[in-house]
């Protein structure tokens, strides 16, 4: 299928990026786990886990798109299932964000942790429908969704790390200082 073959370099790049970023996330979380005050489990489920899931979706989409398919039919079914499953997962993320108490989410958090990923999952679902009529625009929709997942994951991982380094760490050091007095 030549339309999909034309996207091979794109998926090699974004898939490799996602794989590397998953590895970096594990390294950073391992380093954070060594601190005295570990972040609450609920906050990790609400903010860290979705980033790894989004990177994993990019990796999966890249692997599937790089396989030597003869037709787009199976891939379209996968896009639909992944899109619908992702929209269900967005409901779980919204619930986790509301229930966790470690941090009060602001608009930017709702945008990057819920709204943009939900739009990308909806785009995946729509791409499956578009693929029935014409593969080329469907591939552009999937490419756009893939980039949204990648950039959302990068933003969220960066946001979480900077929060741990600059906010959580400062609060922890403030508590240590008051314990000495």
Image (cartoon, grey):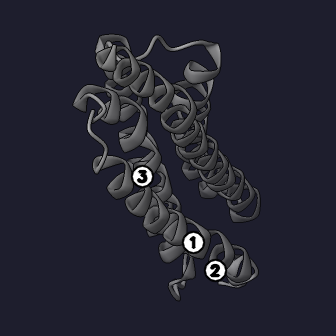
Residue at mark 3: 52
- Asked if marks 3 and 2 touch (Cβ < 8 Å), the reply is no
Local packing at callout 3 (Cα closer than 10 Å; few below 14, some 14-19, many 20+) is many
Q: Quadrant of residue 122?
A: top right
Residue at 38% x, 60% y: name it. Answer: 26
As drawn, the label of residue 46 is none
Cα gap from disc 3 to disc 2, whole angstroms: 18 Å
Using the image as rendered, state which of residue 58 and residue 65 is in the foreground: 58
Residue at 58% x, 38% y: name it. Answer: 162
Q: Give the position of the N terminus as an image quadrant.
A: bottom right
Local packing at callout 1 (Cα closer than 10 Å; few below 14, some 14-19, many 20+) is many
Describe residue 172's horizontal placement relative to residue 5 as left or right. left
Q: How many marks?
A: 3
Residue at 26% x, 38% y: name it. Answer: 36
- Asked if marks 1 and 2 touch (Cβ < 8 Å), the reply is yes
Q: Position of residue 68 (x, y in %)?
A: 53, 89
Is residue 108 shown to the viewer in this render? yes
Residue at mark 1: 15
Relative vertical location of residue 10 with respect to residue 39 in this rendering, above or below: below
Describe residue 95's horizontal placement relative to residue 65 as left or right. left
Residue at mark 2: 12
Q: For the residue labelled by badge 1, is the local secondary structure a helix, a strand or a loop? A: helix
Task: Name the mark nearer the viewer: 1 or 3.
Answer: 3
State the residue lying farthest toward the front: 181
């Amino acid at each position: 299928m030549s339309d999909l073959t034309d996207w091979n370099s794109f998926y090699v790049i974004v898939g490799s990026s996602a794989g590397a970023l998953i590895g970096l996330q594990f390294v950073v979380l391992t380093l954070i786990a060594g601190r005295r005050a570990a972040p609450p489990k609920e906050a990790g489920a609400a903010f860290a886990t979705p980033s790894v899931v989004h990177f994993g979706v990019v990796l999966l989409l890249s692997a599937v798109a790089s396989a030597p398919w003869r037709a787009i039919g199976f891939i379209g079914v996968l896009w639909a299932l992944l899109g619908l499953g992702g929209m269900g997962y967005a409901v779980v993320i919204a619930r986790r964000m509301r229930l966790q108490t470690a941090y009060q989410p602001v608009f930017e958090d709702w945008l990057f942790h819920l709204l943009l990923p939900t739009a990308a999952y909806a785009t995946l679902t729509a791409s499956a429908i578009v693929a029935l009529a014409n593969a080329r625009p469907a591939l552009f929709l999937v490419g756009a969704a893939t980039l949204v997942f990648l950039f959302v994951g990068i933003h969220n991982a960066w946001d979480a790390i900077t929060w741990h380094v600059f906010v959580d760490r400062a609060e922890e050091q403030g508590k240590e200082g008051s314990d000495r007095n």
